[in-house]
Image: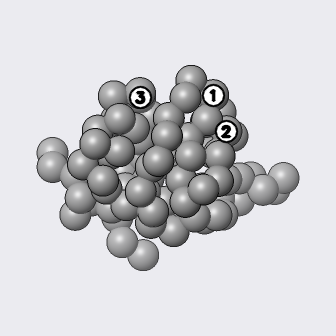
Amino acid sequence: MSESRALHSDTELFAAALFQLEVSVWERTADDIPVRVEDGAIIERITPISVKINGVYYVRSECEFRVGRSGVKS
């Protein structure tokens, strides 16, 4: 598994959208196990409540958005 970095703030999400970075989406199961539900697509829209990726709206409070380390400069 490659290293990835979580996007937490509005600024990080907007930067990922602006630079068209591939973002993966993770949700947690009832057993608190992280499951990847979207694998590397471009952010299409960001609202205070959701992020649209690949035509699907993901609720920000229920998901974690991640980019690969290769796409992020420290």
- The residue under the point 41% across, 27% down is 10
Q: Nearer the viewer, mark 3 or mark 1?
A: 1
Q: Earlier in the sequence, mark 2 or mark 3?
A: 3
- In the displayed orientation, state which residue is furthest to the right: 30
Above or below, 11 against 7 in this view is above
Provide the secondary structure element on which disc 2 rests: strand
Whole-number angstrom distance, CA of label 2 to CA of label 1: 6 Å
Q: Is residue 4 visible?
A: no
Residue topped by disc 1:
49
- The quadrant of the picture occupied by the N terminus is bottom left
Q: Tag 2: residue type? A: Val
Quarter of the rendering containing residue 40: bottom left
In-image side of 72 versus 48 (left or right): left
Q: Earlier in the sequence, mark 2 or mark 1?
A: 1
- The quadrant of the picture occupied by the C terminus is top left
Residue 58, image x, y percentages: 65, 45
- In the displayed orientation, state which residue is furthest to the top: 48
Provide the secondary structure element on which disc 1 rests: loop
Residue 54, image x, y percentages: 55, 60
Residue topped by disc 3:
9
Q: Is residue 65 visible?
A: yes
**10 Å neighbourhood of mark 2: few (<14), some, or many (≥20)?**
some
Q: Tag 1: residue type? A: Ile
